Image (tube, rainbow, N blue to C red):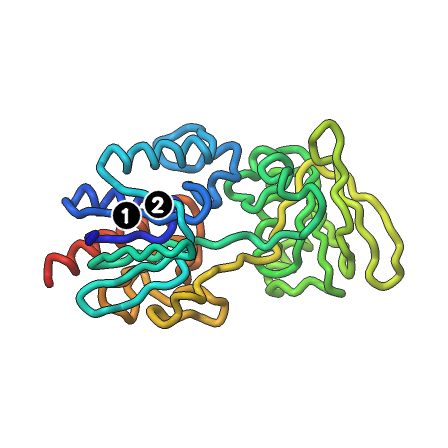
């Protein structure tokens, strides 16, 4: 039996493993696809304290090497359920495995909602981005598009307008839906314009790079191509927490409704990272959650 089983091998999950191991606990990390999570889509990370520049993959590889050196065990399997048996938990996977642990940290992360366009996945990190804070500097002085019209999209557009020569907001609804104050702030930026009631039909590429987007009016069907150097997709995030709702309360958007202490309604079950309800989702906040959740799990074990 493990002291702590961590579901998810992103920055939050691997940090949780590191802090568990450093506190003398055994730790198993169960990851569905590949270690690192969303950060692996970032070709350059320049906002992590103490590191001038690195790629998301480099960061993920270093974290994985670090926890393995500390004694972490890993499994590449898809967790589909966690059973609470009181004094211990059973983590069950799609592949048929059942792992027993005294505590569980759910660090399931989120995935970005995609546009569903041909060639989109291949351009992630190479023209298609999801975070202006993380990657906006790479497009300084260039034209970018932002897909979406809600609060997240408008916040991205505001940040990008400070760096980019032009920001074009592409909204599929008849009007922007973000907060009025955000819309008013954008209206004051001469380098921002919005095209509403529009559908992004295709990505325009050349020499393996993004060159623009082909769009059409939802009302008239008129088509045009908007040239751009980058496309920031801000049409929502998708948490995948449904299988664990019996253990932890979910908010209206499907995120774990837990506070900064990372605790849940189930003793011995903790949550960490982007899957948790929070105002800021960054690499730094993910690793902070991982540390908090692991230390809480260690205290729980020591008090039993």
Q: How far across and how far down the image is residue 290, in percent?
A: 31, 50
Visible in this render: residue 260? yes
Specify the farthest residue to the front: 96
Mark 1 and mark 2 in contact? Answer it, CB < 8 Å: yes
> At x 69% / y 62%, what residue is drawn?
176
Asked whether 116 or 284 is in front, the reply is 116
Toward which corner of the image does residue 108 lie, by quadrant?
Answer: bottom left
Q: Nearer the viewer, mark 1 or mark 2?
A: 2
Asked whether 83 or 149 is in front, the reply is 83
| Label whose residue precedes the other's in the sequence (1 or 2) | 1
How many C-alpha atoms fall within 10 Å of the one at disc 2: few (<14), some, or many (≥20)?
few
Disc 1 to disc 2, how far (Cα)?
Answer: 8 Å
Provide the residue designation for mark 2: 75
Toward which corner of the image does residue 72 lie, by quadrant?
Answer: top left
Q: Is residue 264 above or below residue 25?
A: below
Labelled disc at residue 210: none
Q: Is residue 157 above or below residue 180?
A: above
Specify the farthest residue to the left: 303
Asked whether 172 or 202 is in front, the reply is 202
Q: How far across and how far down the image is residue 102, in percent?
A: 20, 59
Q: How far across and how far down the image is residue 121, in percent?
A: 62, 43
Q: Secondary structure at mark 1?
A: strand
In the image, taking residue 260 as reference, residue 276 lies left or right, namely: right
In the image, taking residue 304 as reference, residue 203 lies left or right, namely: right
Q: Quadrant of the C terminus?
A: bottom left
Q: How far across and how far down the image is residue 51, in percent?
A: 38, 30
Provide the residue designation for mark 1: 28
> At x 76% / y 59%, what residue is drawn?
196
Asked whether 177 or 25 is in front, the reply is 25
Q: Quadrant of the N terminus?
A: bottom left
In the image, taking residue 268 as reference, residue 74 lies left or right, namely: right
Q: Secondary structure at mark 2?
A: strand
């Amino acid at each position: 039996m493990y002291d702590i089983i961590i579901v998810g091998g992103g920055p939050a999950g691997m940090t949780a493993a590191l802090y568990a191991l450093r506190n003398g606990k055994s730790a198993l990390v169960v990851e569905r696809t590949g270690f690192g999570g969303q950060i692996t889509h970032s070709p350059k990370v320049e906002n992590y304290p103490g590191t001038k520049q690195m790629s998301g993959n480099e960061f993920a590889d270093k974290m994985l090497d670090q926890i393995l050196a500390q004694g972490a065990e890993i499994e590449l399997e898809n967790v589909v359920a966690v059973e609470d048996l009181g004094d211990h938990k059973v983590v069950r996977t799609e592949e048929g495995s059942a792992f027993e642990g005294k505590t569980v940290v759910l660090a399931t992360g989120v995935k970005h909602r995609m546009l569903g366009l041909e060639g989109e996945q291949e351009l992630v990190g190479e023209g298609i981005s999801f975070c202006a804070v993380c990657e906006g500097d790479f497009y300084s002085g260039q034209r970018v598009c932002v897909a979406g019209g809600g609060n997240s999209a408008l916040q991205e557009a505001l940040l990008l307008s400070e760096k980019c020569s032009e920001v074009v907001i592409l909204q599929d609804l008849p009007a922007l839906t973000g907060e009025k104050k955000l819309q008013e702030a954008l209206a004051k930026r001469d380098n921002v314009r919005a095209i509403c009631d529009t559908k992004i039909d295709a990505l325009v590429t050349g020499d393996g790079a993004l060159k623009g987007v082909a769009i059409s009016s939802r009302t008239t069907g008129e088509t045009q191509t908007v040239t751009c150097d980058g496309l920031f997709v801000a049409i929502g995030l998708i948490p995948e927490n449904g299988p664990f709702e019996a253990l932890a309360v979910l908010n209206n958007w499907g995120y774990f409704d837990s506070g900064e202490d990372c605790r849940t309604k189930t003793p011995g079950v903790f949550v960490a990272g982007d899957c948790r309800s929070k105002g800021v989702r960054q690499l730094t906040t993910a690793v902070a959650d991982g540390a908090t959740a692991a230390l809480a799990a260690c205290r729980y074990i020591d008090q039993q």
